[in-house]
Structure formats: structure tokens, C-alpha cells
């Protein structure tokens, strides 16, 4: 976990409010577990909510929706990913609310130096703490793919 927040208190408050607000718009008829994400980039704030599908593999998580919005806006300098799990059980110690494995991989690739803040637990994480051995292409392959764009 980072020792200090990558965001100012007002910026963190704004992102938390945005994540909680967008979570109310989630489409979660199957899990009944609404999630909102606010991605703080250099150019702005991008939000996303989970959108489920009867074919679970086609479900879109809030984190990926928000990261997609940031990338589509051309903002690749991601400082923080703030998550709100509206329907999380209010239990005691040991409850770990964190992104799923697919979202951890997205964060590792698209926001490798961002802080990840979980509103429910008030905890900060680094991408590496959540996914210590993320998949990545060999350096030469990354360069070749970038050059082909």
C-alpha cells in the first residue's frame, strides 16, 4: 500500500462521491452487487459502473468501464482508481473488497503507477500489491506493436 494518497483530500472526496453515484446506475440484476469506479487521470475524472449479462463472461466490470472511458478520451496518465462497492456486506475484520483478476490485469497495464482506493474499507493499494506478477508482453514485442500503430 502507498504510504500517502496520490490525490489531495478534495480530489479523493470528489472521486469517492463520483464512484458511489455511478454505482447507483449499475445494471446488476444477477449478482445484486453494484460497483462504481472513478478513474482520476491527468485530464479528468472518468466513471464506470458494472453492467452484467446473463452470459456472465460478457459482464463488464466498473473498473474496466472507467478505464475504457479514460483511454477513449486519450487520457493515459492515470493517477488513481477509486472503487465503491454499494452492496458489499457490512461484516467485521478480514473483509477484502478488491477488483477481480481481469480488472487487476487491466489496471496493471493501463494504470501501473496509480493508487487503487477502496471507499468501503478506506484502504489504498498499488497495482503490484493486487497483482504481483502481472502478464506483460516481452519488451521487444511491446515496441513492435507500438510502432505498428
Image (cartoon, rainbow, N blue to C red):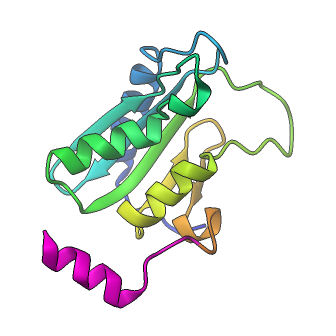
Residue 1 seen: yes
The x and y percentages for residue 14 are 34, 36
Residue at screen point 52% across, 29% down: 59
Front-lying residue, 116 or 145: 145
Q: Which residues are magenta?
A: 134-149
Q: Residue lying farthest bottom?
A: 140
Could you say where residue 149 lies in the image, as x and y percent from the top left? 13, 68
Seen at 33% across and 34% down, the residue is 47
108 relative to 57, above or below = below
Q: Is residue 139 magenta?
A: yes
- Left or right: residue 95 versus residue 45 is right
Name the residue: 26% across, 40% down.
Answer: 69
Residue in front for this viewpoint, 100 or 45: 100
Vertical comparison of 26 with 125: above or below = above
Residue 3 relative to residue 96: left or right: left
Quadrant in which the N terminus is drawn: bottom right
Q: Is residue 123 magenta?
A: no
Depth check: 20 or 130 in front?
130
Q: Which x, y percent locates residue 12?
A: 39, 45
Amino acid at each position: 500500500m502507498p504510504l500517502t494518497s496520490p490525490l489531495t483530500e478534495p480530489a479523493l472526496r470528489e472521486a469517492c462521491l463520483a464512484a458511489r453515484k455511478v454505482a447507483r446506475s449499475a445494471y446488476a440484476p444477477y449478482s445484486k452487487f453494484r460497483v462504481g469506479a472513478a478513474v482520476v487521470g491527468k485530464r479528468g475524472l472518468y466513471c464506470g459502473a458494472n453492467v452484467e449479462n446473463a452470459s456472465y463472461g460478457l459482464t463488464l466490470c466498473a473498473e474496466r468501464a472507467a478505464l475504457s472511458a479514460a483511454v477513449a478520451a486519450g487520457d493515459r496518465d492515470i493517477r488513481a482508481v477509486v472503487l465503491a462497492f454499494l452492496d458489499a456486506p457490512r461484516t467485521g475484520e478480514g473483509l477484502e473488497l478488491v477488483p477481480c483478476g481481469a480488472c487487476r490485469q487491466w489496471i496493471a497495464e493501463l494504470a501501473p503507477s496509480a493508487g487503487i482506493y477502496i471507499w468501503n474499507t478506506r484502504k489504498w493499494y498499488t497495482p503490484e500489491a493486487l497483482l504481483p506478477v502481472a502478464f506483460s508482453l516481452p519488451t521487444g514485442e511491446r515496441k513492435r506493436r507500438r510502432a505498428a500503430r
